[in-house]
Amino acid sequence: MKVVLLGPPGAGKGTQAGRLADSLGVTNAASGDLLREHQRKGTELGKLARPYMERGVLVPDDVTIPMVTDWISAPEQSKGFVLDGFPRNIAQAEAFDAELADKGGIDHVLCINVSEEELLRRLSGRWLCRNCQSAYHEEFSPPQKAEECDRCGGKLYQRDDDRPEAVKTRIEVYLNETEPLIGYYSDASILRKIDGEAPIDEVARALMAAVRI
Ligand code: ADP
Ligand code: ADP
Ligand code: ZN
């Protein structure tokens, strides 16, 4: 089972990816998390990506495509995966299709829809675990203890690119470069649109229902 989660920044992709992957018995990853991991480790790839990520624009395809195809080719992903944040433009989608051609292709692309007003509320209050990347929200999904992860006890932090200026750029980049993927995948009849404004558990149920079709 190979699933891609599509949707604007703050739609809830990260919140849902792990739960969906657990239910399906597959692994999950977010391209943004893979990039941030490279930054933490100080790799060449991480250094190259940093200025793009700080501004909220896409990191070049010649960096992201090999990074993600390496991940999907690893033995851990042989049963399938839930991928969040990739592909993010048509060139990435074409490269991904080529890579998956002899593995049966993508089974489902689930696009999580949320209004811009709600995205701004979500990103300005988002806190993430430094250790396991779990997402919290100070109002909508607060941790039990302030600044501490319920799942692993890790310390919570706010992302630099969740500042209002970078968020504005990220939403524009989504509309210009990523939203065209909705047409791209509708043509392949694997796309489902999900209402992302419902409560977290309800969105999780809708995603599960969509992959069972
Ligand atoms: P969100 O889902 O909250 O928008 P991500 O963590 O997916 O944020 O992405 C953060 C940043 O990482 C993006 O603004 C972009 O700079 C970079 N990035 C992540 N995935 C990709 C990708 N597939 N292609 C290019 N850049 C990416
Ligand atoms: P993405 O990975 O798409 O950028 P996240 O999963 O990090 O989005 O979610 C963004 C913020 O919104 C987080 O603070 C998260 O706790 C919160 N959130 C996610 N889903 C919902 C929901 N259905 N209702 C309310 N808040 C949500
Ligand atoms: Zn954690």
Image (tube, rainbow, N blue to C red):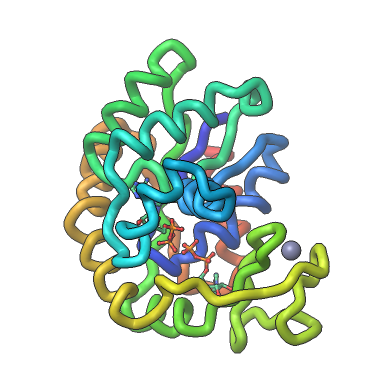
**Front-most of residues 19 and 210:** 19
The answer to whether 154 appears left or right of 203 in the picture is: right
Say which residue appears at 17% left-offset and 57% top-offset. Answer: 176
Say which residue appears at 47% left-offset and 53% top-offset. Answer: 32
**Front-most of residues 40 and 71:** 40
Number of residue marks: 0
Residue 207 at least partly seen: no
Say which residue appears at 45% left-offset and 48% top-offset. Answer: 46
Counting from the top left corner in percent of width and height, residue 91 is at: 23, 35
From the viewer's perspective, is residue 48 above or below residue 55? Answer: above
Counting from the top left corner in percent of width and height, residue 30 is at: 52, 48
Counting from the top left corner in percent of width and height, residue 39 is at: 50, 53
Counting from the top left corner in percent of width and height, residue 56 is at: 31, 64
**Front-most of residues 196 and 50:** 50
Could you say which quadrant of the image residue 10 lies in? bottom left
Q: Quadrant of the N terminus?
A: top right
